[in-house]
Image (cartoon, rainbow, N blue to C red):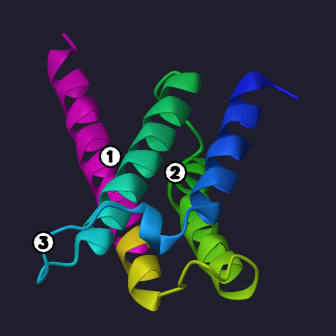
């Protein structure tokens, strides 16, 4: 088993087992947990999209790029919510968490598409 996979698995199991009492209290009246879901899935998707693009030297298969950078993180978020509902019952599964996950991943995808279009446009403008 590779080290990144092992570290990822440990982080996954650890975050699933953390009970709500282990999370610090935040000021009331603002959905901090949804913001955390949005930001974490934005970062997960952004890093995945960037790395997959770099791995394929700036021209990955668009469908595979979207799969690894958007679809897989969304399924991962849904899987976590199902696990929290059926197995890790010390945690609560919420549709709002999944919506925040999808919104974060979608925002990363849309920003990545904008950046790639700008990059390709600037390359066309440089040609002599």
- Which residue is the site of mark 3? 27
Is 38 rendered above or below residue 42?
A: below
Image coords of residue 122 (percent x, y): 18, 27
Decide: few, some or many residues near mark 2? Use Cα within 10 Å; few <14, some 14-19, many ≥20. Answer: many
> What secondary structure is the stretch in magenta mostly built from?
helix
At 20% from the left and 67% from the top, the residue drawn is: 26
Which quadrant of the figure contains the C terminus? top left
Q: Earlier in the sequence, mark 2 or mark 3?
A: 3
- Which residue is the site of mark 1? 112
Disc 3 secondary structure class: loop
- Which disc is residue 69 wearing? 2
Disc 2 secondary structure class: helix
Q: 66 left or right of 11?
A: left
Is 100 rendered above or below residue 54?
A: below
Is 46 rendered above or below residue 101?
A: above
User: Can residue 103 be seen in this snapshot?
Assistant: yes
At 60% from the left and 50% from the top, the residue drawn is: 68
Q: Is residue 120 magenta?
A: yes
Q: Quadrant of residue 33?
A: bottom left
Q: Earlier in the sequence, mark 1 or mark 2?
A: 2
Residue sitting farthest toward the front: 21
- Which stretch did the figure color magenta? 102-128
Label 2 – label 3 distance at C-alpha = 32 Å
Q: Earlier in the sequence, mark 3 or mark 1?
A: 3
User: Can residue 59 be seen in this snapshot?
Assistant: no
């Amino acid at each position: 088993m590779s080290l990144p996979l092992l570290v990822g698995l440990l982080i996954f199991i650890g975050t699933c087992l953390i009970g709500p009492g282990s999370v610090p209290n935040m000021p009331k009246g603002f959905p901090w947990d949804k913001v955390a879901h949005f930001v974490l899935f934005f970062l997960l998707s952004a890093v995945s999209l960037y790395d997959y693009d770099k791995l394929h030297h700036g021209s990955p298969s668009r469908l595979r790029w979207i799969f690894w950078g958007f679809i897989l993180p969304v399924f991962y978020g849904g899987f976590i919510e199902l696990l929290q509902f059926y197995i890790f019952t010390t945690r609560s599964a919420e549709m709002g968490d999944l919506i925040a996950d999808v919104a974060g991943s979608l925002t990363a995808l849309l920003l990545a598409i904008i950046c790639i279009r700008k990059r390709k446009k600037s390359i066309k403008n440089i040609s002599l």
